[in-house]
Image (tube, helix red, strand yellow):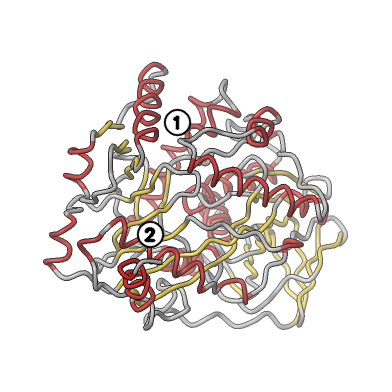
Amino acid sequence: MAASAMSRVADWTTSLSDAQPVPYWLDDPQRPRPEPALTGDESCDLLVVGGGYSGLWTALIAKERDPGRDVVLLEGREVGWAASGRNGGFCAASLTHGLSNGLTRWPDEIAKLEELGVRNLDAIEAAVERHGLDCEFERTGEIDVATEPYQAEELAEWYAELERRGLADGVELLDGDAVRAQVDSPTFRAGLWDRRGVAMVNPAKLAWGLKRACLALGVRVYEHTPAVDLVRSGPGMAVRTPYGRVRARHVALGTNIFPNLVKRVRSYTVPVYDYALMTEPLSAAQLASIGWQNRQGLGDSANQFHYFRLSADNRILWGGYDAIYPYGGRVRAEYDDRPETYAKLAGHFFTCFPQLEGLRFSHAWGGAIDTCSRFSAFFGTAHQGRVSYAAGYTGLGVGATRFGAEVMLDLLSGERTERTELEMVRKKPLPFPPEPFAWTGIALTKWSLARADERGGRRNLWLRAMDRVGLGFDS
């Protein structure tokens, strides 16, 4: 390695020397105290299992629909501690992990899915206002940036496709000069700005605010109370916990990547670990050197992509690229920290923003994403409609979990709605095979995606085969 390259690597690693291995969002002195654990027996109309966005939205909407409904929420650790408190804080309107994925899988429903997605994001914004959720909500949109010539061509082709289908409202194609006028990086060649379809939030504050709103409406919240098993109990269900039990007429499961209490659902998701860095706050001069006056979220167009955004105090969150699947699909705390990925991300950061040389990272962390084979949520019921579940959001759950909460409540009600009639809701993805086939297939897909990035986006035989059976991944 040349001396100059070695020097740059040293600079990147030095920038990480003070980084705390904890999620920035959760490292907050205003973090609320947890509610007490459940001891003894409880009964209720609706039991919600999971204190992330899925469970919180379900409990909140259940009380808003019927204030007299008795609702209990159980959380195994603390509200928002897992994916809901450690993601990038991109709250997207898309319910389908992006329009391209939705158009490929549900072309006949895509207009309705897009409409429902916009309505869902509007409803989140309204809830933030209605309940006074102090979560730094900014509807600034997101720019998908091209860093290679073939990516710029693909963005232009995709924009033309959106125009042809009447789906380009609020979307603007930016050439190299225009995108660099928004955020200045020498690597940016073009961009596609979705002006209204994405908001930025502080994800932990959103979870904590939803918890406060639930408590204010009378939801009984128990933290440090894992749900151990789920069984029939007379006309309803019972969930056992380490120190007690809850009987309920209905149960909504929002546990996502953690083992579902309906065991047959477990094969539909695998954990993929994602990692992120957070910088120290930028000075006024540093911020001026990159522009970013409109505070959009950004993501690049590679298969192994980065996502990045500004926090309320003008730090840059920089995440993505590596997606790590642990053999056997285990979810373990030790996987939340991966120094080799942090070093890689730091190098990519300074390649994107060389004008920020000398900036340091204050936090570095990871977490598990609940991934399914169609890369967007799936839904279902069990125990003759007494139990509903939603899972598989694959990284875009900050916004879509609210829609999933409405679906779970619709399914429990037994009523046909515009949501329950969707093919997306009625049908499930393909389950993952057992090991070693799951690990082998995921590893081969990851290697193939990296090769496609190196070869101008050209997909190899494996990726084309996955496309043909509905398992293609291009984002």
Q: Is residue 348 left or right of residue 355?
A: right
* Residue hosting label 2: 348
Q: Which mark is residue 115?
A: 1
Residue at 70% of width from left, 52% of height from top?
Answer: 269
Report which quarter residue 338 is drawn in.
Answer: bottom right
Q: Secondary structure at mark 2?
A: helix
State the image coordinates of residue 434 (x, y, percent, origin top left). Answer: 83, 52
Alpha-carbon span between mark 1 and mark 2: 36 Å
Total labels: the figure holds: 2
Q: Is residue 287 left or right of residue 131?
A: left
* 246 shown above or below 402: below
Residue at 58% of width from left, 55% of height from top?
Answer: 58
Task: Give amino acid for label 2.
Answer: His
State the image coordinates of residue 437 (x, y, percent, origin top left). Answer: 80, 50
Q: Which mark is residue 32?
A: none
Report which quarter residue 246 is drawn in.
Answer: bottom right
The earlier-in-sequence mark between 1 and 2 is 1
Report which quarter residue 312 is drawn in.
Answer: bottom left
* 415 shown above or below 313: above
Task: Give amino acid for label 1.
Answer: Glu
| Quadrant of the snapshot with the N terminus | bottom left
Q: Residues within 10 Å of mark 2 (few under 14, many from 20)?
A: some
**Residue 61 in view (yes/no):** yes
